[in-house]
Each structure stands twice: as C-alpha cells, then as structure tokens.
Image: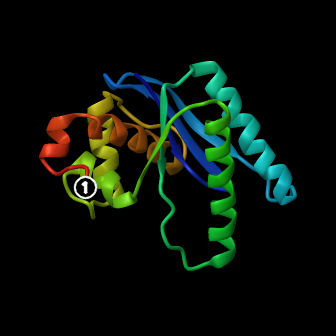
Amino acid sequence: MIILGIDPGYDILGWSVINDKFKVFNYGIIKTSPSDPVEARLLNIHRSLDAIIDEYRPDCASVEKLFFQKNSKTVMNVAAAIGVVMLTLKLKEIPFFEYTPTQIKNSITGFGKAEKGQVEFMIKKILNLDEIKGPDDAADALSIAVCHSLCRKPEARAAGFCK
C-alpha cells in the first residue's frame, strides 16, 4: 500500500510518500508565495498536490488534523488549505484519514506529548534514514504517513498506540 502523508499548511505544506513496509519514495514541501493572492496560493497547493498524486499513485492519504491556533487569520488560511487538500484527494478518489498531533506522536513514540526531536529520531529509525532533508514540515509529513501505516496494524491498535 502506498501512503501519501500530508502536513497541511498555507505557507508550507509538507508531503511524503511511503509504503506500508516503510520504504520512502519521496518527500518534500509545497511552498506558496506570500505575495500571491489567497486564491493563487490555494490553486498552487491543488496543482502541486495533484501532480504528486499523478506521479506516485497513492492508495490512501493521511492528513494531520487541524488543532487550535491562537491566530484566527492563520487558522482560517490553514483550514482553507486543508479544504483544498481534501477536495484534491476526493477528486482523485483517494481515501484519507485524519490524525491529531497527539495520535501521531503516540503511534510513533508511545507518548502523545513527545517532543519533536523524539518523533524525528524515531522516524529516522523506522524509515532507516540517516537524516531528514528539508524543513520540519517534510519531517512531519513522514510522521503522518508512518502513523497511518502503524495504525492500520491490529497490534498497534491493541497496544493503544493509535488512540
């Protein structure tokens, strides 16, 4: 099974493509320009994600669920980007699953309040990577894809890692 992991964002959207055996096909970011109008930035996200889907043909996608942010303007823009992601996935008939940051951390480290460094350490171990290149958004997208792969396994659910 090929899994597309998405760390939704308006300025930077992280993405990754792995399989359920933890082979990394690719990962990176979609960056939008602050000088572009909102609709152009959202269209950029759609077109870029659409091209990634066409190239890697994922069977499903896992998306980080939006959590509360203090800045209402930021949360509105991120919510719009998530809407574009969901629409793009739906147009391509790709089922998607949402996970909270706590679920992601818990599935990977066994601790829902793990620090970012702990999660990244485990992701490198699980995916057999020496390093994760690029911004945190790309690493987060790898974590989201790994979370979905782990949470599909009955033993992970039974152990309570995917609550």
Quarter of the image where one finds residue 9 = bottom right
Q: Is residue 100 above or below residue 13?
A: below
Based on the displayed image, in which of its 4 quarters is residue 130 positioned? Answer: top left
Q: What residue lies at 32% left-to-right and 40% top-to-bottom?
A: 123
Q: How is the image coloured?
A: rainbow
Q: Element type at marker 1?
A: loop
In x, y percent, where is residue 59?
48, 25
Question: Circle 1 is placed at which residue position?
Answer: 163
* Residue 105 image offset from top left, x and y in percent: 30, 54
Instruction: Report the quarter where the N terminus lies.
Output: top left
Quarter of the image that includes the C terminus: bottom left
Q: What residue lies at 69% left-to-right and 48% top-to-bottom?
A: 84
What's the amino acid at mark 1? Lys
Residue occupying image coordinates x 47% and y 57%: 65
Q: Is residue 94 left or right of residue 139?
A: right
Left or right of 127 on screen, residue 88: right
Percent position (x, y) of residue 122?
27, 42
Q: Is residue 104 above or below residue 28?
A: below
